[in-house]
Image (tube, rainbow, N blue to C red):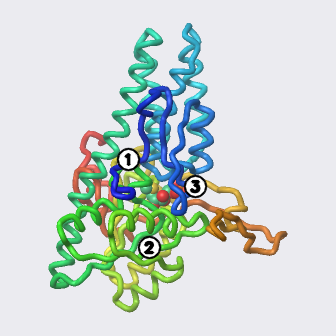
Amino acid sequence: MKVNGKDYQTIWVNEINPHLISIIDQRYLPHQFIIENIGSVDHMVIAIKDMHVRGAGLIGAAAGFGMYLAALEAPKDNSFDEHVRKCAKQLKATRPTAVNLSWAVDGQLNAIQAVERPSEKIDIALKNAAAIANADAEYCRLIGEHGCALIEEVSREKNGEPVNILTHCNAGWLAFVDHGSATAPIYAAAKKGISLHLWVDETRPRNQGASLTAWELGMNNIPHTVIADNTGGHLMQHGMVDMVIVGSDRTTVSGDVANKIGTYLKALAANDNNIPFYVALPSSSIDWSIEDGLKEICIEERDESEVKYMEGLCDGEIKKILLTPPDSAAKNYGFDVTPARLVTGIITERGICKANKESILQLFPEKK
Ligand code: MRU
């Protein structure tokens, strides 16, 4: 997608030194556009944990490249695989909710261990990491094609009046390698000339909506308005939202959706107001091994300081300010689970299905 008119993806092998992985450091957006080069597994672990990169698809791609760095670092003797297995554990422990992370790491581990020579292991790790990243971008492009039809339909019903879509957090191209999941249908519809407008939830505590979604929509000329997290229900009651599209960090095979904290409340409000609530996700975000999202999805808890403090631009500098009494306790759950019954449909790379096991497995019969 575009940044100041230039095409970018969110992660790539450094053009000058192929032993470095380049990322857009999302901690500084929207105020500064900084590219960070990552040359070790330890550095990649920090980048994922501290959210230099974030979002389900990008976490998966970053972990894939992290495993390539592990192969580069590994002793070139018979302890190679042991080193790589240790790094896999480290990478998997960074963020527990997005299933793309373990999917990418396990895929890499199998591929690396399946070949003999260290040089082959490094080659396969690089090829596989690139394949994970390319697949992520391609799946999101396809999600865009399928989801675009839904927006087109509403646009026709509204005789071309702008389609108002509400989204939560950042399931945009910054959360993937390109296109995004929730934003892919939006970018595709805008490309077709369909008039639309986005309501962007600010998404406390890390403000991915206000800082990332708003930034990337602006860079790609999509009309949008940032709203405080509590505003969506009011807009829905007053006919100002035509549909909700969000992403997902882990979805069960029965259609329960874990996504950024606050998603569930939007789903409840959408349900109460008969507004379609869609979840856009590549199949790499589906956890085929679980059915009950409330019981089985591990919800990441992050540091309380993210709730107590807020960061922003002040006098030209990025500063942190304290919002609460210094001694107040805070709780910081990263995600919540929206039960399948509140989800109108799931938009995947293979098409749109209902949020239930039968319908999901009809699209992905090989997972039966
Ligand atoms: O904590 P984050 O920023 O990594 O959270 C992930 C997300 O951006 C969202 O939950 C998103 O809506 C789904 S991931 C594409």
Q: Residue at horizontal 31%, vertical 52%?
A: 140
Q: Earlier in the sequence, mark 3 or mark 1?
A: 1
Q: Quadrant where the N terminus lies?
A: bottom left
Q: Residue at horizontal 52%, vertical 72%?
A: 202
163 relative position to 19: left or right: left
Residue 157 % position (x, y): 17, 82
Q: Residue at horizontal 19%, vertical 84%?
A: 158
Cα distance in 3D space between marks 2 and 3:
19 Å
Whether residue 144 is situated above or below residue 73 in the rendered picture: below
Kindly identify which numbered label has been placed on residue 9: 1
Residue type beneath disc 2: Val
Residue at image mark 3: 27
Determine whether the residue tagged by mark 3 lies in a helix, strand or loop.
helix
Residue 160 % position (x, y): 17, 81
263 relative position to 79: left or right: left
**Residue furthest toward the front?**
316
